[in-house]
């Protein structure tokens, strides 16, 4: 009997990764397509929405490789979050470029909302901050710039959707019934965590017609079936959807309250499962829907760290201290410590728990004894220090104590970093067996949605750990080094922060 295979689509900011995955998490095939990111003005970031779809279809075509007998049981989609596409419901054609999550063009609009005293209400309802990062003010900006789109939106002719809903609409051809999942909806500033749907009050606050929005569905369940004319001649159910960081949480099988993961990518995203009730946001954290299964929302606290792998890239491209990123691990291991040197990675401000956009990075504690290796180690150590900042904020906010931190992402291949992280937190760090945890989470949501796996418990049983790093002093967090780190952070903070 042929093995049941799932098709996982991970549509990211710079590229699309597609996998053929078994129910046990084994990756059988992988394909990748780059996508272009455009910067038409300072602070503006855009993409061609049609190219995003084309990258998915092309990568999937490579996976299926012309084999008409190879039809996956279901498709799971995970996507770059907060990026928004406005398109016609009948023709499925975009009416503007996709505005990417990194885009800052709506910063002034966010300032207007703050000046009107609306931030507390927005934070209470959505669990998010008033920031251009999120989708609502991007749409508000577009409707201001192009008033004719507002008229069409009010008539129900248009849809403003995150990338998951855009891809579902295009691949199924069902443009009049556009759907998103609760995890992506919760990243828009328009989703009320308590109402569990898009909010009329929030739509009014941001001047966005409710008719412009898609329908919110479960993260695991049949959201549509691909149209053979649009997708490689195949009808395949799309049965799992989640934003990329929520999908990684699911892919790491963090399915019980208190379980947590950190993805060391360009930046880092620490998420902890907080169960079925949204914790009031505080300590510079976000509250978000992790996933919705069987009509029940599971929530997560999220802490965003802006610079992780970007620090390694700076060592390579900015300072020329390394020729390749893979050199960072061996150089880190070559010295016992950073010789009193601290790197605060505030290239574009500090994220959680500080949220200080005006802070700027620094190398502190320099002496004549500091070498190239010490600087490289300081940059890598900063990843672990920033993670502890967020973990401790989460513990204070949710009233929990972490038992373990599961890690993935490019920098997690460094054994030295993982051991340093474990020692700094006083708790085990578990590296995933597969580096593709985000796509794997989407695949497992699709398996649950099609009844191929019996819910999160079955996902936890299927998850396979990689190497586990035990702290040298379990349950004890070193204070002297961390106090010196906090002093370094204080030195780069802005007066506003």
Image (spheres, rainbow, N blue to C red):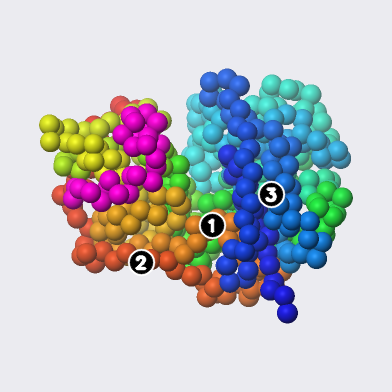
The answer to which image quadrant residue 162 occupies is top right
Q: Residue at x 73, y 79 (%)?
A: 1
Q: CA distance from mark 2 to mark 1?
A: 18 Å
Marks 1, 3: nearer the viewer: 3
Q: Position of residue 417 (x, y in %)?
A: 32, 53
Q: Position of residue 10 (x, y in %)?
A: 62, 51
First in sequence: mark 3 vs mark 2? 3
Q: Which mark is residue 436?
A: 1
Q: Secondary structure at mark 1?
A: loop
**Is residue 213 a member of the stretch shown in magenta?**
no
Q: CA distance from mark 3 to mark 2?
A: 33 Å
Q: What residue span does the magenta drawing correspond to?
A: 313-337
In depth, the one of 293 and 261 nearer the eye is 261
How packed mark 3 is, by other alpha carbons closer than 10 Å (few <14, some 14-19, many 20 or more), is many
Please name the residue that numbered disc 2 is placed on.
468
Q: Is residue 348 left or right of 149 when viewed as pictured?
A: left
């Amino acid at each position: 009997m042929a093995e049941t295979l799932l098709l996982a689509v991970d549509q990211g900011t710079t590229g699309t990764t597609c996998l053929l995955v078994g129910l046990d998490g084994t990756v059988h095939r992988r394909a990748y397509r780059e996508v272009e990111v455009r910067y038409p003005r300072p602070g503006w970031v855009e993409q061609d929405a049609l190219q995003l779809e084309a990258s998915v279809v092309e990568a999937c075509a490579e996976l299926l490789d012309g084999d008409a007998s190879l039809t996956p049981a279901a498709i799971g989609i995970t996507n770059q979050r907060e990026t928004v596409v406005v398109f016609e419901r009948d023709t499925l054609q975009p009416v503007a470029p996709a505005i990417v999550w990194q885009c800052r063009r709506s910063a002034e609009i966010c300032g207007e909302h703050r000046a009107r005293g609306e931030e507390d209400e927005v934070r209470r309802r959505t669990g998010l901050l008033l920031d251009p990062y999120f989708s609502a003010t991007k749409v508000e900006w577009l409707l201001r710039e192009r008033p004719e789109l507002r008229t069409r939106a009010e008539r129900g002719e248009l849809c403003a959707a995150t990338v998951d809903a855009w891809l579902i609409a295009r691949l199924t051809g069902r443009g009049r019934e556009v759907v998103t999942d609760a995890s992506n909806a919760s990243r828009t500033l328009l989703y009320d965590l308590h109402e569990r749907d898009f909010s009329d009050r929030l739509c009014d606050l941001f001047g966005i017609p409710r008719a412009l929005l898609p329908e919110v569905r479960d993260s695991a369940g049949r959201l549509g079936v691909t149209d053979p004319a649009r997708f490689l001649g195949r009808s395949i159910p799309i049965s799992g959807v989640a934003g990329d960081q929520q999908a990684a949480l699911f892919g790491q099988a963090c399915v019980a309250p208190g379980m947590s993961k950190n993805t060391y990518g360009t930046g880092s995203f620490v998420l902890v499962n907080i169960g079925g009730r949204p914790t009031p946001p505080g300590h510079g954290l976000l509250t978000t829907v992790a996933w919705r299964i069987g009509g029940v929302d599971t929530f997560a606290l999220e802490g965003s760290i802006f610079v992780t792998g970007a620090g390694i890239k700076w060592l390579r491209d900015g300072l020329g201290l390394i020729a390749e990123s893979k050199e960072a691990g061996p150089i880190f291991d070559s010295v016992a410590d950073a010789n009193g040197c601290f790197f605060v990675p505030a290239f574009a401000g500090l994220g959680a728990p500080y949220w200080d956009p005006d802070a700027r990075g620094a190398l502190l504690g320099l002496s004549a004894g500091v070498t190239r290796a010490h600087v490289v180690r300081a940059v890598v150590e900063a990843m672990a220090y920033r993670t502890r900042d967020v973990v401790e904020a989460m513990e204070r906010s949710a009233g929990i104590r972490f038992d373990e931190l599961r890690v993935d992402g490019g920098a997690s291949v460094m054994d030295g970093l993982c051991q340093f992280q474990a020692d700094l937190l006083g708790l085990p760090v578990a590296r995933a067996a597969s580096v593709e945890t985000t796509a794997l989470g989407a695949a497992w949501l699709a398996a649950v949605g099609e009844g191929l796996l019996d819910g999160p418990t079955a996902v936890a049983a299927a998850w396979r750990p990689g190497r586990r790093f035990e702290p040298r002093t379990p349950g004890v967090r070193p204070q002297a080094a961390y106090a010196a780190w906090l002093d370094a952070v204080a030195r780069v903070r802005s007066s506003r922060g």
